[in-house]
Image (tube, rainbow, N blue to C red):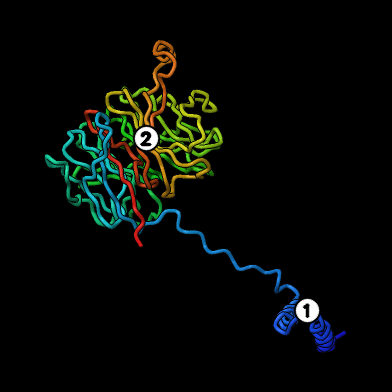
Amino acid sequence: MDCRSYREYAMSEIILLRRRALMNLNSAAANILALALAISTLHPHALSQTAAPEKSANQNPSNVRSAISIYDLESKSVRVVYTADKLWEAPNWSPDGKYLLANSEGKLYRFSLDANEKAQPEKLGLDAAYECNNDHGLSADGKLLAFSAKYGSSQESRVFVAFSDGTKPLLITENHPSYFHGWSPDGKWLAFVGKRGDHFNIFRIQGGGTEQQLTSSAVDDDGPDYSPDGKWIYINSNRSGGWDIWRFPADGAGPGDGKAERITSDELEDWFPHPSPDGKWMIFLSFPKGTPGHGVKTNVQLRMMPLPQSAAQQAAAGAGAGAIQVLTHFFGGQGTINVNSWSPDSKRFAFVSYEVLP
């Protein structure tokens, strides 16, 4: 049967069905039935199609109001020191305690803190050709600034070091992508995340040296930050299935990452561990269970626990010594606390919360 014959046959069947329907249904119902039959006969897939789902909302919006804030451990309070209707990320606290460092729109700024801890941004003297991201930090003596940025022909992040005012930057990592995260306490090493295959692993490098790979498992690691005594590097990793906090000796996790130790193990997804300068505490950012990565903004928690000690010290401290505290809940995520932001006296730390704008 050709197409035209099929159409004529179908229409005759529709007319017949409509007549039969009229015997049992009122006019409006019959017309509806006939229309449905016509559509399904002439276009067999029409009624099985459903409307395409709406495109999912942007999981990491940039049209936000940013609030650079300070959490006080003693009073358990949050104070907003700067807010603006644009994306600000990843505050660091200067080693002398006088200013914060943060990034926005590819540039780095310092926020000098007055007596009331209110601040206004002052752009660093870094050349505008550097497109900085949210991975940056000052050396322990405050003289040098490490930062990650796209620059020149490279469209991927690499690590640079400049003077603290942003002048005279020097490329440190030839390979890319590379993302700085932490200075060793003696200022000799930079810990960073690099992708040199299918996964992100942890590396370290000295100025003018070659990179040394510190983890090697076929997993993704991120957020390396040194303990204040320089003996450990703390990271977040999905090597246990979800995202948890881990640590390993500063010279590397060893063959098969056998020296890596798991620190957190609950159902939340834990990112960006930051030990306090006095070695007592570690703060980290926790996403809801099942959040696949940190490139989102959602309802998050800042949590804190005592910085893990040796096995003997832990045993002496007794049960509950490593209990995790929830400090605050808010809307945040990417950009909240990517790099270490403790005050030098270990009494406060800085972070960013967000509000999506209409």
Residue 190 showing in the rendered view: yes
Which residue position holds label 1?
Answer: 41
Residue 319 figure quarter: top left
User: Dot 1: few (<14), some (14–19), or many (≥20) neighbours within 10 Å?
Assistant: some
Q: Give left or right: position of 6 versus 222.
A: right
Q: Is residue 123 above or below residue 278?
A: below
Cβ–Cβ under 8 Å for marks 2 and 1? no
User: In the image, residue 294 lies at what x, y percent?
Assistant: 44, 45
What residue is at 42 percent from the left and 13 percent from the top?
318
**In front of the other: 224 or 266:** 266
What residue is at 35 percent from the left and 38 percent from the top?
328
What type is the residue that disc 1 sits on? Answer: Thr
Q: CA distance from mark 2 to mark 1?
A: 66 Å
Which residue position holds label 2?
Answer: 191
Among numbered discs 2 and 1, the one appearing first in the sequence: 1
User: In the image, residue 89 lies at what x, y percent?
Assistant: 31, 48
Q: Which element carries disc 1, helix, strand or loop?
A: helix
Quarter of the picture containing the N terminus is bottom right
